[in-house]
Image (spheres, rainbow, N blue to C red):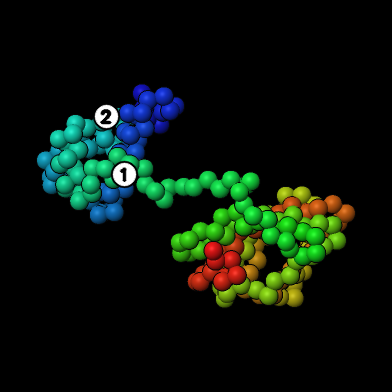
Amino acid sequence: MPLTQYDGSDPAEAVGRTLAANLRAARLARAWRLEDVAERSRVSRNMLQQIETGRTNPSIATLARISATLGVPIGELVSPAPDLGEVVRGSAVPVRRAGRASDARLLVNDGQAPFIELWDFTIAAGDDIRSDGHPTGTRELLLLHAGRLVVDVGGSRFELGADDALRMRGDRPHGYANPGTEPARLTITVVYSGDRDPRYVA
């Protein structure tokens, strides 16, 4: 059965999927073709292709030759990369007070350049949130899930309804105001061109 159909019932298939992805990533990182690995490792191109596509699992001897050729320990070849992904549980995210009666949660604060933050906001009816602006070059992508929102950016005004999105500069003074009678729910992605805003660095 192809590994793309793996349903979690066979641990060997999970290892095979990981090996396939890691082998391909290590090969491409060196700009090597399958033929290059085959020549250096004395493992056939066909076998390497089958490993990379998850159609077979190699013997320990074959895996050892591949490992030595790539200069990657066997343990790393068969272990999931630590930076593939991370789940952030909403219940574990602290709530920050924003405006007079509104809440903000920094869901994800990526620690790698280019630095990116994912925010969840609930802006109470009649409330507003102001910012002096982030470092030069910062951009923001905003999605309003529910309610109404008025966004002021450097003197320009944008009015949004539910399901509207806004792309804006985040390095100018800006504010978000809820002129409606119901809470406004929105998600904002902040993309920094250089250093992060020191106010939100953990």
Q: Quadrant of the C terminus?
A: bottom right
How far across and how far down the image is residue 18, in percent? 34, 38
Say if 98 sits above or below 31 in the image. Answer: below
Q: In which quarter of the view is residue 20 placed?
A: top left
Quadrant of the rendering where the N terminus is positioned:
top left
Q: Position of residue 169 (x, y in %)?
A: 63, 69
Question: Which residue matches tag 2?
Answer: 56
Looking at the rendered structure, the kind of residue marked 2 is Thr
Count of all numbered marks drawn on residues in the image: 2
In this picture, residue 200 sits left or right of residue 180: left
Q: Is residue 196 visible to the viewer in this orientation of the structure?
A: yes
Within-10-Å neighbours for mark 2: few <14, some 14–19, many 20+: some
Report helix, strand or loop for mark 2: loop
Q: Is residue 163 above or below residue 202?
A: above
Q: Which mark is residue 22?
A: 1
Residue 132, x across and y down, in percent: 68, 75
> What percent of the width, then of the height, locates residue 69?
16, 48
Q: In the rendered view, does 131 fall on the left or right side of 147?
A: left
Q: Residue at 57% of width from left, 70% of height from top?
A: 197
Q: Which mark is residue 100?
A: none
Q: Residues within 10 Å of mark 1 (few under 14, many from 20)?
A: many
Question: Which residue is depicted at the point 68% across and 56% down?
Answer: 95
Task: Confirm whether residue 165 shows in the render.
Answer: no
For the residues labelled 2 and 1, the Cα–Cα distance comes to: 15 Å
Residue drawn at (16%, 36%), measured in percent from left and top?
Answer: 62
Quadrant of residue 97 within the rendered picture: bottom right
Front residue (pair 191, 157): 191
- Check disc 1 and give the amino acid type: Asn
Residue at horizontal 25%, vertical 54%?
30
From the viewer's side, name the closer residue of 114 and 32: 114
N-terminal-most mark, 2 or 1: 1
